[in-house]
Image (spheres, grey):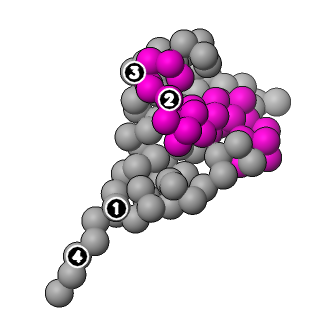
Amino acid sequence: MIIISSSFVFMDNFKNTDFNALARSQTSIQMKMRLLALAHFQDGKSQTQIAQFLKVSRTSVNKWVHVYLTEGLAGLQEKPHTGLLALNNERNWLTT
């Protein structure tokens, strides 16, 4: 029995994905940034170079690459916000 890890599958997809085209099709600025970071990483740029070019932290670039390699594109999607601000927005929405 052969077990292929999900990281291996996503890594294979990583090489064949046109992140620039995906970024152009996005409406979310955050998702565009994540996809552009992956496009630069795919081109062989270092995380430091990518962070400087996109004006984000190297930690963010590292996280985006790691999340993509472990979870794929679905992992890069915006997560629901929680906490007091989200709760207040929900209450305001319900009362209007």
> Residue 93, position in %: x, y?
74, 32
Crowding at mark 2 (Cα within 10 Å: few <14, some 14-19, many 20+): some
Q: Is residue 31 above or below residue 16?
A: above
Q: Is residue 37 visible?
A: yes
Quarter in which the C terminus is drawn: top right
Give yes or no for contact between labels 2 and 1 (Cβ–Cβ under 8 Å).
Answer: no
Instruction: Identify residue type, mark 1.
Output: Phe
- Comparing marks 4 and 2, which lies closer to the viewer? 2
Q: Which residue is mark 2?
A: 45
| Disc sitting over residue 59 in the figure | 3
Q: Residues under labels 2 and 1: Cα distance?
A: 21 Å
Q: What residue appears at the point 61 percent right and 18 percent down from the top-left corner?
A: 54
Q: CA distance from mark 3 to mark 1?
A: 22 Å
The tag earlier along the polypeptide, 3 or 4, is: 4
Q: Residue furthest front?
A: 44
Please give the range of residues in magenta. 22-50
Where disc 1 sits, the SS reads helix
Q: Earlier in the sequence, mark 4 or mark 2?
A: 4
User: Residue flagged by tag 3: what amino acid is it?
Assistant: Thr
Disc 4 designates what residue? 3
* Disc 1 crowd, CA 10 A, few/some/many (<14, 14-19, 20+): few
SS class of the residue under badge 2? loop
x, y percent for residue 22 = 71, 48
In terms of sequence position, does the residue under pointer 3 or pointer 1 come before the other?
A: 1
Pair 3/1: label in front? 1
Per the image, the residue denoted by label 1 is: 8
Front in this rendered view, residue 33 or 91: 33
Q: Residues within 10 Å of mark 4 (few under 14, many from 20)?
A: few
